[in-house]
Image: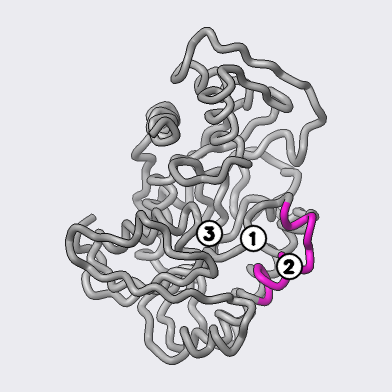
Amino acid sequence: MTGEFDGKRILVTGASGFVGRHLTRRLLDGGAIVTAVDVLPLPESLRSDESGRALEYRQLDIREESAVSAAVGSERWDLLFHLAAIASPRACAKDFASAYKVNVQGTFHLLQASSNVARFVFLSSSAVYGAPERIPIDEDHPRGGKDPYAMTKILAEDLCRTYASNYQRPCTIIRNFNSFGPYQEAEYVIPSIIRQGLTKHEIEIWNSEPVRDFSYVANTVDAILQIARAGGESVYNVGSGVGVRIGDLATMIASKIDRAMPIRDLRKEVLGSPKLVANVDRLRGLGWSERVPLSPGIERTVEWFRQ
């Protein structure tokens, strides 16, 4: 990876978040001149760089249009990766007004200020598909998402399309499925199961039957960078292309911690679609392939939580 982004001026919003910090680190390691933007403080993992490359950090709330205009519109950027969002579906449902202001209005402010951006890359979500009509889900599948989080992502995607069509903003949309790995918040399924196993020595899952598409975060970042290199006003799914039952996932995680660990299935009503699996043929057509399979990815994540 070293040198592939030498000299490129790149802005990353949401750089302090889960995927954002991994993406920012990879861009720095690839020689990019990176400006990190987030409302949160810069994480320790991004404060130092053995190569000596500097990371510029701007603490910024994307809900503030004038601040976004001053930070983004006054300079030229080779790439803008827009990852800043309220990414928790539960948080969006609890406070739809805040989710709308960040996820929709924040995206509008960035697009409005991005006339000097050569390519705008927006991280959307598989949530836009809603209950799937077919599996695996390709990028032409109807967007049937109806919950507040899904709606904010659908509206933000439409803003990207509007600016691409009417205001010459080259936009690429990435629909991320279930990324996991170090630094992910505990409310998500894999860190939740790992923490239970490490602290309680037992695992409780709501329902073992739902099927999800899990991708280790290094694979997600590989995909994002491959898509950015390809350019084009297109939509890409990012996932592994493989569905995994939550019950089987819990068994796999338990095996990395303690094979004798009990697993309890609460058999509660499934939240969301019973099955979400990405069709990643379009992504593979760019030359992407999964570098870290699920099992080694789980091992790395368990070890990170242990430490």
Does 207 sit left or right of 289 as displayed? right
Q: Whole-Å distance between the Cαs marked 1 and 2?
A: 8 Å
The kind of secondary structure element at disc 1 is loop
Depth-wise, is mark 3 or mark 1 nearer the camera? 1
The answer, for residue 234, to whether it is visible in the render is no
- Residue appearing at x 22%, y 68% in the figure: 53
Label 1 with label 2: CB-CB less than 8 Å:
yes
Residue 29 on image: x %, y % = 25, 59
Q: Was residue 157 drawn as part of the magenta stretch in this picture?
A: no
In this view of the protein, which residue sits in the foreground, 288 or 31?
31
The amino acid at mark 2 is Ser
Tell me the quadrant of the picture where the C terminus can be found: top left
Residue labelled with disc 1: 86
Give the residues drawn in magenta, as a range: 91-105
Q: Was residue 102 drawn as part of the magenta stretch in this picture?
A: yes
In this view of the protein, which residue sits in the foreground, 275 or 134?
275
Residue labelled with disc 3: 174
